[in-house]
Image: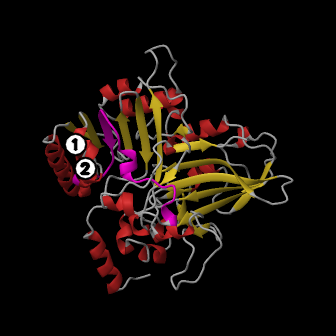
């Protein structure tokens, strides 16, 4: 998950369910699944969307998008994968280069430290993963699988990372997609991928923020100490954006600002915002909504959650915009997929496994007095462009270009702050910062 700091320069019918069952029987994407035709593309922009198989290889909706094979490519020497869910046979079929890699490390959550109700299914998932890893080893790679235990009983091991080392560089890919067919080919996902060269001489170059963050995260959550050392062999000085990682548990001292939304606050407070930006708004687009507590929203958004505009600035940006008066209203928008948008999505009701917005969670809890109140009117905005009957619902959407991508359910989270430049007669919106990730919208996540 990354922050890009922009500088100044209803019930379904039987037909729907039948279509869902048919989609589950789809095989892997065809071997021509490479979408990106320029190998240097990921060195040029912060984020990419994934290619959606339903839109076709040359469809406008896939323009500039990446497939998993675009990422896992070339003469890779070593590989590290982390995720909550794996379909390793599918991944190897999509990326046959994996059969030629010398060493592959796979990290996933330990089901023994998870919710007891979920343990049986996750233990079976882990068994199948180990079995698939052994099958992959028969082609030559040394494949290891580590189930990462967590000390926090409510914690989850949730990162989706790909590290690929080459003779002269490392490729770091951070995405919102698990390693499954449906995640990479039928949902909207965000992908951040960039190559970094080897350091000219070990110890000759100071460590960078990205290097320290990657190494600290792996050391804090896994036993992949060898990869911590490998990470430090490369130069990340050209990194686009900043990493915001989350580590379950209680933190003290300097660790308080190292992880989660406290890290995000520190990054944004030290980032000069675009000059002359006014009419600010904060947009939170999420796929999973968890319990919302009033005091946490006040801390995170910087204002009361019970109104869509209020006299306060975003708390993490206040010090970055000292010229702005605190009396300026800040609009807060929450974008969620509707029931009909899930039902009529490419996956149909099957997408509900990843898009979870329960009606009881559309409430704000005040833990101080033990009460709950509905989300304020005007706060919620729809994910897509059309109503269930096909009529156009609005002029814009969470992903405005290309607009038809909203037929694929979102499995990403996007927070951004934007405004309009004072004196700009065109009223064109400009982004102050953007954050993307893969987690619930809640204090715990």
Where's residue 32, x and y in %?
34, 58
Residue at left 51%, top 82%?
388
The answer to whether one can see residue 269 in this image is yes
- The residue that mark 1 highlights is 99
Looking at the image, is mark 1 or mark 2 earlier in the sequence? 2
Tell me how many marks there are: 2
- 160 over 25 or under it: above or below: above
Q: Secondary structure at mark 1?
A: helix
In space, the residues marked 1 and 2 are separated at their CA atoms by 7 Å
- 327 vs 34, nearest the viewer: 34
What stretch of residues is rendered in magenta? 60-89
73 magenta-colored: yes
Where's residue 316, x and y in %?
65, 43
- The residue that mark 2 highlights is 92
Mark 2 and mark 1 in contact (Cβ < 8 Å)?
yes
- Where is residue 141, by image quadrant? top left
103 magenta-colored: no
């Amino acid at each position: 998950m990354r922050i890009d700091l922009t500088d100044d320069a209803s019930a379904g019918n039987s037909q729907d369910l039948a279509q869902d069952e048919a989609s589950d029987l789809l095989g892997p994407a065809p071997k021509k699944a490479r979408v990106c035709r320029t190998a240097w593309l990921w060195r040029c922009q912060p984020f990419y969307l994934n290619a959606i198989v339903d839109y076709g290889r040359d469809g406008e909706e896939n323009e500039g998008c990446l497939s998993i094979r675009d990422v896992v490519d070339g003469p890779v020497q070593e590989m590290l994968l982390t995720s909550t869910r794996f379909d390793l046979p599918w991944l190897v079929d999509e990326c046959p280069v994996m059969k030629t890699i010398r060493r592959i490390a796979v990290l996933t959550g330990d089901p023994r430290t998870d919710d007891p109700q979920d343990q049986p299914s996750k233990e079976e998932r882990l068994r199948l993963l180990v079995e698939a890893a052994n099958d992959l080893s028969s082609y030559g790679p040394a494949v290891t699988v580590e189930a990462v235990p967590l000390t926090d009983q409510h914690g989850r091991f949730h990162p989706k990372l790909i590290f690929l080392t080459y003779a002269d560089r490392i490729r770091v890919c951070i995405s919102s997609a698990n390693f499954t067919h449906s995640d990479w080919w039928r949902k909207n996902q965000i992908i951040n991928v960039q190559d970094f060269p080897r350091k000219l001489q070990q110890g000759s170059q100071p460590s960078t923020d990205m290097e320290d963050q990657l190494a600290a995260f792996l050391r804090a959550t896994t036993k992949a100490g060898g990869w911590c050392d490998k990470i430090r062999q490369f130069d990340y000085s050209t990194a686009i954006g900043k990493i915001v990682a989350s580590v379950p548990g209680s933190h003290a001292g300097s660790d308080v600002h190292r992880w989660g939304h406290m890290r995000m606050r520190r990054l944004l407070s030290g980032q000069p915002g675009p000059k002359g930006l006014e009419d600010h708004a904060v947009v939170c687009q999420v796929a999973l909504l968890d319990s919302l507590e009033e005091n946490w929203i006040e801390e995170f958004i910087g204002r009361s959650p019970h109104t869509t505009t209020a006299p306060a600035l975003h708390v993490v940006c206040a010090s970055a915009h000292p010229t702005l008066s605190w009396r300026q209203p800040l609009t807060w928008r929450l974008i969620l997929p509707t029931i009909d948008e899930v039902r009529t999505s490419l996956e149909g009701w099957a997408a509900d496994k990843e898009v979870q917005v329960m009606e009881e969670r559309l409430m704000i809890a005040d833990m101080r007095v033990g009460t709950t109140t509905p989300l304020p009117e005007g706060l919620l905005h729809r994910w897509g462009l059309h109503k269930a009957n096909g009529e156009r619902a609005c002029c814009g959407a969470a992903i405005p270009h290309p607009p038809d991508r909203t037929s694929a359910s979102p499995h990403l989270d996007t927070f951004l702050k934007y405004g309009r430049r004072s004196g700009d007669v065109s009223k064109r919106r400009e982004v102050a910062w953007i954050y993307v990730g893969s987690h619930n919208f809640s204090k715990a996540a």
